[in-house]
């Protein structure tokens, strides 16, 4: 019996987990201007990693451990929730060497954050270029809008 099954092509087939060049340029601009707009704009089109960790569940009567994988969210003192994302494998590993990377586009990470009731995306927590993408920008990023520079500053162009 012949089966004509195929696996979907991976979204990032040649990805080695390093910092995307577009994001590297945005980080350099951020370092010189302390303005995260370039990074937020880059997230419209680049790959990031969402950290996933194993959570120990209940131990059934047969003694086997039950676990599940879950994306990592943080809750602020004000009760708002944020999804953790990382620009590279090195950045994620410096945060938690045991975390498993899930490569996604920045806009997909934003969508996942909103789907889980989060109001922010935390990029590179604990890293030198830590950036918070909050509600308004998170919603535009999730919608697939583009952040552009204008004479008056940055603005979102809706899809």
Image (cartoon, rainbow, N blue to C red):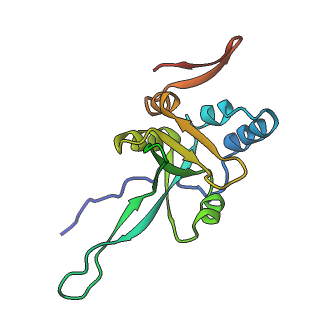
**Residue 45 seen in the current view:** no
**The one of 128 and 151 positioned closer to us in this rendering:** 128
Question: In the visual, does 65 lie left or right of 158?
Answer: left
Q: Position of residue 136 (x, y in %)?
A: 49, 27
Q: Is residue 139 shown above or below 12?
A: above
- Residue 97 visible somewhere in the drawing: yes
**Observer-nearest of 136 and 98:** 136
The residue drawn where x is 45% and y is 30% is: 139
Viewer-side residue, 154 vs 12? 154
Query: Image point 67% across, 51% down: which residue?
Result: 19
Q: 39 above or below 124?
A: above
Residue furthest bottom as drawn: 63
In the current view of this chain or complex, which residue is farthest to the right? 32
Can you say whether 63 is above or below 29 in the image?
below
Quarter of the view holding residue 94: bottom right
Q: Residue at x 74, y 37 (%)?
A: 30
x and y percentages locating residue 131 in the rendered image: 63, 42
**Residue 44, horizontal then vertical, whole percent:** 55, 34
Left or right placement of residue 86 versus residue 21 in this view:
left
User: Where on the picture, by quarter, is residue 14?
Assistant: bottom right
Quadrant into which the N terminus falls? bottom left
Q: Quadrant of the C terminus?
A: top left
Which residue is at a point 73% across and 42% down the rendered structure image?
A: 27
């Amino acid at each position: 019996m012949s089966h004509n099954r195929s696996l979907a092509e991976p979204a990032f087939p040649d990805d080695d987990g390093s910092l995307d060049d577009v994001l590297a340029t945005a980080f350099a601009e951020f370092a010189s201007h302390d303005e995260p707009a370039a990074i937020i704009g880059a997230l419209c089109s680049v790959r990031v990693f969402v950290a996933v960790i194993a959570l120990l569940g209940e131990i059934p009567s047969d003694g086997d451990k039950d676990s599940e994988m879950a994306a990592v969210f943080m809750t602020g003192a004000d009760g708002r929730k944020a999804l953790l994302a990382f620009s590279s494998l090195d950045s994620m590993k410096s945060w938690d060497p045991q975390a498993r990377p899930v490569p996604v586009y920045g806009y997909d990470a934003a969508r996942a954050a909103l789907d889980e009731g989060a109001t922010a995306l935390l990029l590179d927590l604990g890293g030198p270029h830590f950036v918070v993408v909050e509600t308004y920008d998170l919603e535009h990023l999730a919608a697939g809008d583009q952040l552009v520079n204008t004479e008056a500053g940055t603005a979102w162009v809706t899809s």
